[in-house]
Image (tube, rainbow, N blue to C red):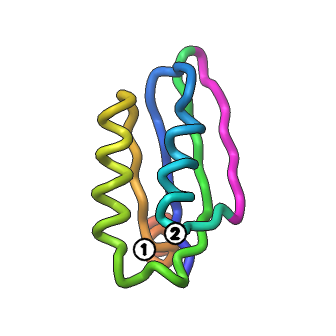
Amino acid sequence: MKGVITVIGKDKVGIIAKVTSALAENNINILDISQTILQDYFTMIMIVDLKDRKDFFKDIKDNLEKVGRSIGVSIKIQHEDVFDSMHKIS
């Protein structure tokens, strides 16, 4: 199972380091990553491998939200299937 993580907030030093460290601490592999700065806003989307962590999804979600609050950004994680369903055009 894969997950989609989005990170949005005012740009500052250390956002990528904090987010990727939290993922590494939870043994979550980043499969793809894209980030950009839109004016002063940092935006990042990652596809991550959750195959070994599906039983702990809520813990991962809570931990990432906590990391986001600590650095002043919004971090959201969704199962890939949920993300795909929400973004299909019928």
Q: Residue at x 47, y 68 (%)?
A: 83
Q: Residue at x 52, y 19 (%)?
A: 12
Residue 35 vertical position relative to residue 78 in the rendered view, above or below? above
Magenta-drawn stretch contains 33:
yes
The type of residue carrying mark 2 is Gly
Q: Which residue is mark 1?
A: 82
Q: x, y (%) of residue 29? A: 63, 66
For the N terminus, the quadrant is: bottom right
Nearer the observer, disc 2 or disc 1?
2
Q: Residue 41 bears which disc, if any? A: none
Cβ–Cβ under 8 Å for marks 2 and 1: no
Rendered image quadrant of residue 54: bottom left
Residue 18 vertical position relative to residue 38 in the rendered view, above or below? below
Tell me which segment is drawn in magenta: 31-39
Q: x, y (%) of residue 8? A: 46, 36
Mark closer to the chain start, 2 or 1: 2
Instruction: Report the magenta stretch's main SS.
Output: strand
Q: Which residue is mark 2?
A: 3
